[in-house]
Amino acid sequence: MKKLKYVLSASGLLLAACSKSIYAPTNKIYKQQAKSFAQTVGQYPPATPGQDSLDLAKDFVGTINFNLRKPNFVIIHYTAQDSVAQTLKTFTLTRTQVSAHYVVAKDGKIYHMLNDYMRAWHAGVGKWANDADINSSSIGIEIDNNGTEPFTTPQIASLTKLLGNLKKNYNIPAANFIGHADIAPKRKPDPGVLFPWKDLARKGFGLWYDDILELPPVTFDYRKALHTIGYDVSDYNAAIVAFKKHFIQTDVRPHLTQLDMNVIYNLYQKY
């Protein structure tokens, strides 16, 4: 039995070593890039693009009142890939030009891929309310899911803990926990209709509508309401579908039912 335990232990150490070595090259590149950014931020006086040619800001007076920029949104995605290993590889290849701050595996393991204060390339061309550069103001979380399967209990448990830490650390408002489809209704469907938005909203991550709904006024403007909530309504049908994938989930057709209208009216009053 002792010999068997030793073999298992040694095998575990070997697997751990192999696992670490797989990403050693990309971890090295990460460190190099982070060091380069740190040097840029630490320059005194700080570099300003085009400063010399424009002959501006010759005098630098350093304020003592500043800190790091912090994320104000959390964007949740599904990976649309077959395994967490495939996703980690995708995010460590230069040619893919995509990344995220965190990846949550089916077994609940969380992979932290980027410092929270740095800008990941997860949102692409997206917009929420007046923010048209979501990558610069958000943390991106990818959940290992191909888009057609239920999310696992360990995944959601780990995600909930992660969201709790992010909300506490950066004081992120509940309304600012949203999905990729919310910010890119013309392009993206994730995290999809199987994602438990209602359960997470009950825990403070995202908003949800009340159990008792009122009928909206006859003159209520639903397009304006969706825009107030945050949706890009330049393609109104796409915005309706994205809204329904988040809040209705059982019906995602591009037209509004009475229930949809009641829900929009209820949420509109919360924003």
Image: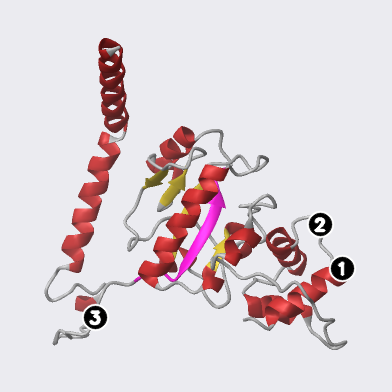
| Magenta stretch contains residue 73 | yes
The residue shown at (38%, 42%) is 94
Asked which secondary structure carries label 3, the reply is: loop
Position of 271 relative to 204 (above/below): below
Q: Residue furthest front?
A: 1
Which residue is denoted by mark 2 in the rendering? Answer: 251
Q: Which residues are magenta?
A: 70-79
Asked which secondary structure carries label 1, the reply is: loop
Q: Earlier in the sequence, mark 2 or mark 1?
A: 2
Q: Nearer the viewer, residue 124 or 13?
A: 13
* Amino acid type shown at disc 1: Thr
Which residue is denoted by mark 1 in the rendering? Answer: 257
Tell me where residue 57 sits by quadrant: bottom left
Whether residue 241 appears in this view of the structure is yes
The residue shown at (58%, 58%) is 180
Which residue is denoted by mark 3 in the rendering? Answer: 66
Position of 8 relative to 114 (above/below): above
- Estimate how packed mark 2 is, as few (under 14), some (14 to 19) or many (20 or more) residues with alpha carbons within 10 Å: some
* Gap in angstroms between the C-alphas marked 3 and 1: 49 Å
* Amino acid type shown at disc 3: Phe
Image side of residue 9 versus residue 152, left or right: left
The residue shown at (51%, 74%) is 131
Asked which secondary structure carries label 2, the reply is: loop
Q: Earlier in the sequence, mark 3 or mark 1?
A: 3
